[in-house]
Amino acid sequence: MSLALELVRGYLDKKPDVSLETLRTRLEKKRVEQEPVVNANSLMPSEYGVAEAFELSWEKLDENAQSFGCLLSLCALADIPLSIETIEDGKKQELNEKAIADLLELHLLQQKSQGIYRLNPEIRQLIQMKLDKSSEADEAKTKFAAMMLEVAKLIPQQPNPEDILNLTPHIPHITEVATHLSQYVGDENLITLFTKLAWFYQGQGLYQQAEPWLQQCVELTQNCLGLEHIVATSLSNLAGLYESTGRYNEAEPLLEQALELRKRLLGEEHIDVATSLSYLALIYESTGRYTKAELLYQQALELWKRLVGEEHPHVATSLNNLAALYCYTRRYSEAEPLLEQALKLRKRLLGEEHIDVATSLNNLAQLYESTGRHTKAEPLYQKALELSKRLLGDNHPDVAISMNNLAALYRYARRYRKAKPLFEKALKICERTLGVSHPTTMTIRENYTSCLREAAYH
């Protein structure tokens, strides 16, 4: 059934006594009235009948239903989750329920499933035209933008699979505000929207989708007066993404700029300065400048201890970072006590079910493997992998790295039947999320190829 006929049917359901002749007259009248609107808004000829039928239906709605419809028209062209039951105000809940029922009855809104609705693109455009001609357009757009901002604020920096499942239906509508209604948000809130969208994608290892949001953060903070205090954070966030995708040359100048900016604005003794020192040290480490990295890691560790005390997750992270560097430079006797201390701290402060605990388990396992204690390494690798899967889902790059580490241990022990499927899964995850040319992807591919070659000879 065409959309125009569907709208007419909805109208007749509400007005069963209207004759066909009367209906034809009313539609013709609406056609004449709507022709200038149709031409002015470049509606397709196939939409002409829709515009006339829409007008008849729209007039049947009360003011509350029309306002609700206008609000919905600001959503993206995607499924719209409506949780009416969460509204605490009983009267408002009833008004919204009635508005939804009226819109559904007139076929101006479609219900996909329980609590999930959708607007036809043509209906959405026609309602937006109504809204833009009204005196309440700015108020409605400001209200909708504020609603989406509150939802966006629920996105954590490290979303778990449950967070991602719950937030996914809202992402198109948050994106709609960030893209098309940014003037109704305000600069600092817009930065929040950009950052939260980036976190949503980064949390799934979808770095290409996260990058443009972080780039927009940097551009906005650098171009707007009064936002200098946020520039360093935006630079660090973008640099962190570049580091995750192996683009160290792009990350380094951003982190150096962020560190200098934080020192100037905040002074030497500040937690943000400690964070910048740690991030910059990681870049130096990743590019083989171990002496420079060690110095910054040590500075960061001492600064964290002075600022937050010995019993703090940031101190545990600094211990872990410095220990990892010692492992890279084969200073295992210096690394081991730091890794054990970091693991104990994280378990005590964060609990057993935390991604930082998985990182510590993995790093300690790597040290055991490097020092020939393979029977101690294997259970730690296994625990780290299972914990990462629970917290990040099965398709995250960090899960792939954990798979690679366990597979490498099996490969060393010539347990190829266990190693091969892990290498294969890890490679697929990294190719999909990081790309085929990422350093991590290439390392895993080399490991997998070597494993296949060795297995063929045994």
Image (tube, rainbow, N blue to C red):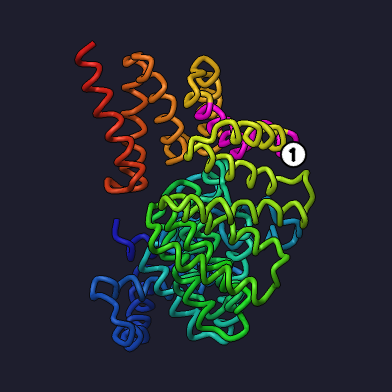
Vertical arrangement, residue 91 with respect to residue 221, above or below: above
Q: Which residues are magenta?
A: 348-367
One can see residue 67 in this view: no
Judged left or right of residue 220, residue 264 is right
**Secondary structure mainly formed by the magenta segment:** helix
Query: x%, y% of residue 60?
Result: 52, 71
Along the line of sight, which residue is nearer the eye, 280 or 119? 280
Amino acid, disc 1: Leu
Query: x%, y% of residue 301?
Result: 67, 51
Vertical arrangement, residue 183 with respect to residue 429, above or below: below
Badge 1 crowding class, 10 Å Cα cut-off, few under 14, some 14 to 19, many 20 or more, is few
Residue drawn at the location 32% of the way across and 48% of the way down: 438
Query: x%, y% of residue 407?
Result: 39, 24
- Is residue 351 found inside the magenta-colored segment of the image? yes
Along the line of sight, which residue is nearer the eye, 288 or 361? 288
Residue matched to label 1: 349
Judged left or right of residue 420, residue 209 is right
